[in-house]
Amino acid sequence: MDEIARAFALALELMLSGDRELYAIVALSLQVSLSATGIACLLGMPLGMLLAAVRFPGRRLLVVVTTALMGLPPVVVGLFVYLLLSRAGPLGDLGLLYTPTAMVIAQTVLVLPIITALTRELGEALIEEYGEFLAAMGLRGARRIPTLLMEGRHALVTVALAGFGRAIAEVGAVMMVGGNIRHVTRVMTTAIALETGKGEIALALALGLVLLAVALAVNALAHLGRRRQRELAHAGG
Amino acid sequence: MRWWWFALALLPALLFGPSSGLAGERFIILQSTTSTQNSGLFDHILPRFRAATGIEVRVVAVGTGQALRNAARGDGDAVLVHSPEDEARFVAAGHGILRCRVFFNDFVLVGPAEDPAGIRGLSDVAAALRRIARAGAAGRALFLSRGDDSGTHKKERRLWRAAGLDPTAASGSWYREAGAGMGATLNMAQALGAYTLSDRATWLAFANRRGLALLLEGDERLFNPYGIMVVNPARHPGVRFQLAKAFRDWLISPAGQEAVASFRVRGQQLFFPDVRCDERSGS
């Protein structure tokens, strides 16, 4: 039990210590997971709305596949991206293996199905509610997508946060394609795995608490931004 | 107008951008093992190598089996592992060249301090394993294997063969396979009160021992030599051959050997220099 107490003290100490290696690890975690979430949103949100708004052959299959892929184990994604980026693999000449870029690619693959499936879910609910209204405005099919994205933007923030949560918390994919190389590809989760391996249990748990604090900060910022925007919307009409 | 917030949310991602290894930077990828990383050896020697040559060594620490498989795909410029038979096979298959034995340490049997199998004081590791198996079959002891095809796991399987036993028949009962790195396996052994085989370096640096004790050491069969190889550039053209060779040459030089020998954990030397190069591998 004293280890848990020690971890809390150590976590505070770490956050206040100004330890540059720790800050660099936190920064890389944020950089990789925010980039992956950003790219997955740019691709997955329009795709999700497309699946909600347009009937086309193969749509049902895509819906089932994206929903099922939400449960993809990170280590499988890591293995898949590793085989792609390995020097012996099809994209080996790019020399991306064991770089932050490889980690962004892996986490994008991991997060994309979540963003797509949740956005589709949201899109279908919006269409049920406003479909007739949109039709009255002359909007049908794919032409509804920009309006749907616009009207769903508050809920889409939550969708993005769900994706970010998955990315920042996973260890299997970044471990495999990043390699947990010190000063290069070490992120919070791989550092935690390493410290656990050294038997530095309190330090590992403290790093976990720092990770939690970072995730909380990102979520709080997103919600603050959303509230501020609502206020603006009300004030401006 | 309403899009500003959405755009703002994406901004940090686009601003930072994923940065890959900067072009022109002098570095190599070294495929190596958890034992060398978890003990802290690399943190001790790599800054010295960098100060001497300006070359950064990026370590990917996995089990010996995975390190060799990754390197055989060209994903690495040099390999530093501990399983002589597999190293020889790696060279014979044309994946590695310039093989040298660089330093050694040894394995130790650790287990619960109460020692239910009664192996403390033995000097014959095969006899100790037989006692653990007997106590295990009687439900009084557990043995935790790495179970991950690492150098330590390969050594452990050879030791069971030397004891004339096949513990995998009891896998899941008293013989448990962790499928994890050395440190994670020691954590599990500590929690389960199990016996396990560890390299001395990871054991000495391991901070979470509570109730675990070193019970057997010194049998010559527990000898643990480490070897380095450069990935064959003829087989994998992307290999940073000159830089990898520079690291290998430094490690077998007096400066490199001194760096290895001066590494201490709790006042103890963990790795002992011993350079022997394999003439047939092109050195």
Image: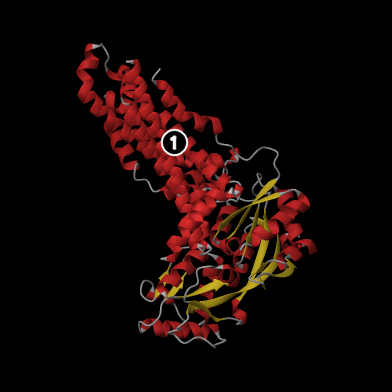
Circle 1: residue type: Thr
Query: Can residue A142 be seen?
Result: yes
Query: Can residue A90 be seen?
Result: no
| Residue at x 69% of width, y 68% of height | B103
> Measured along the vertical axis of the image, is residue A139 above or below residue B195?
above
- Towards the viewer: A25 or B37: A25
| Residue at x 32% of width, y 25% of height | A50
Instruction: Determine whether the residue tagged by mark 1 lies in a helix, strand or loop.
Output: helix
Q: Position of residue B162 (x, y in %)?
A: 53, 81
> Measured along the vertical axis of the image, is residue A172 above or below residue B198?
above
Q: Position of residue B219 (x, y in %)?
A: 60, 82
**On the picture, is B14 further left or further right than A74?**
right
| Residue at x 43% of width, y 82% of height | B133
**Seen from this angle, which residue lies furthest right?**
B254
Q: Position of residue B238 (x, y in %)?
A: 65, 44
Q: Which residue is mark 1?
A: A37
| Quarter the C terminus of chain B occupies | bottom right
